[in-house]
Image: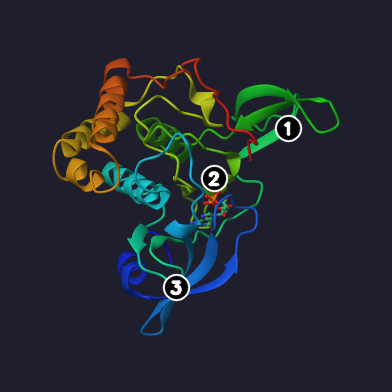
Amino acid sequence: MLPTDPAALPLLHHGRLEVSGRLVEASNATFLSTVECDGVSADCVYKPIRGERPLWDFPDGTLAGREVASWLISEATGWSLIPPTVLRPGPLGPGMVQLWIDIEDERGLVDVVALDAVPQGWRPVLRAHDRYGDPALLVHADTDGLRRLAVLDVLLNNADRKGGHVLAGCDGAVYGVDHGICLHREDKLRTVLWGFLGQPLCGGVLDVLRRVRCSLDGALGTALAEHVTRAEVRAVCKRTDRLLTTETFPAPNGNWPAIPWPAF
Ligand SMILES: Nc1ncnc2c1ncn2[C@@H]1O[C@H](COP(=O)(O)OP(=O)(O)O)[C@@H](O)[C@H]1O
Ligand SMILES: [Mg+2]
C-alpha cells in the first residue's frame, strides 16, 4: 500500500495488528508487523512504548509520541515525507505503528565513497576514512525530496538522521523513518544531510514554512501538545521562525556532535 493511499491511515488505526518479526538492528523493541481489515492488509513497523529504552535527555512523553508528532509536522508541510504513523493499542501494549516503505535500492541516497567516486551531482558532507583506512567521503544525493527532508529535520530538530533512516521508496519518493528522538527544545540537530549547508531555501519551501507556522498557532500546535511539552511546541515555532528569517539551510551550532554515529 502506498503511503499516500487514503486507506492507509484508517487501516493502521483500526486493522488487526499482528507481529511477524523483530528488526534486530533496531535499538529499541521494533517489530515488523501487519495490519489487516476486511481482506486488505499492509506491512508496518510496530514499536510498543514498553519496549522503549529510557533516555536521559528525552525524559518527557514517549518516543512513540514523538514519532507521531513528527508525522503531524510532516503532514502539515504537505510533503508526505514520513510514512503514515499512529499511536494505538497492540499485542505488546500501546505503541507507534507506521506503514512499511518498500525501498528501491539498499544503497539509497546517502553513501560513503572514495574521494574520486562522488556520484554526479551528489553533495559531500564529511571527509573520513573507510574501514581499510583509506580516505573516503560521506555524501548524499541532491534531490527536491532530500532538500525537503533536510528542512523537515530542522523543524523536527532531529537528533538522529542516519543514512539508514533515509529511504528511497519504490514509488520514487523519499521517506524519513525513526523520529523517536526529535522535537527536543534545545538544539540537537544531528544528521547526515549537511550537504545543503548555507544554501538558500527556495520560494516554495518558504511558502510551506509560512503555512506550517500559522498552523502551529492553531490546529497543529494543539495536536502536537498531546505528544510533547508546551515548551517543545514553542521551540518548533522558534525553529520555523528562524528558517523564515535566515531563508538558508543552517550550519551545525558547534555545541553538539553534528553527525550521528554510526552514520548508517
Ligand atoms: N516505516 C518503515 N518502512 C521501511 N523500513 C523501515 C521503516 N521503519 C524502520 N525501517 C527500517 O528498520 C530499521 C530500524 O527501524 P528504526 O525505526 O530505525 O528503529 P529504532 O528506533 O529501534 O532504531 C530502519 O533503519 C529502517 O531500515
Ligand atoms: Mg534507528
Q: Which residue is mark 2?
A: 165
In this rendering, does residue 217 appear at all? yes
Name the front one of labels 1 and 3.
Answer: 3
Q: Is residue 157 left or right of residue 255?
A: left
Q: How far across and down, in percent of the image, does residue 219 sit?
A: 16, 45
Name the residue carrying label 3.
91
Q: Earlier in the sequence, mark 1 or mark 3?
A: 3
Q: Nearer the viewer, mark 1 or mark 2?
A: 2
Q: In the displayed structure, does residue 72 sit left or right of residue 192? A: left
Amino acid under label 2? Answer: His
Label 2 crowd bin: few (<14), some (14–19), many (20+), radius 10 Å: some
Residue 164 pos. (x, y %):
59, 45
Quarter holding residue 150: top left
| Label 1 to label 2: alpha-carbon separation | 19 Å
Quarter containing the N terminus: bottom left
Q: Nearer the viewer, residue 209 or 179?
A: 179
Q: Earlier in the sequence, mark 2 or mark 3?
A: 3
State the quadrant of the C terminus.
top right
Q: Nearer the viewer, residue 146 or 221?
A: 221
Dot 1 or dot 2, earlier in sequence: 1
The residue at the point 54 percent across, 63 percent down is 31
Residue 113 marker? 1
Whether pointer 1 and pointer 2 mark residues with C-beta atoms closer than 8 Å, the reply is no
For label 1, the SS is: strand
The amino acid pointed to by label 3 is: Pro
In the rendered structure, which amino acid carries the disc numbered 1? Val
Label 1 beta carbon less than 8 Å to ligand 1: no
Residue 49 % position (x, y): 43, 57
Label 2 SS: helix
User: Label 3: few (<14), some or many (≥20) within 10 Å?
Assistant: few
Pointer 2 residue Cβ closer than 8 Å to ligand 1: yes
Q: Position of residue 56 (x, y in %)?
A: 47, 36
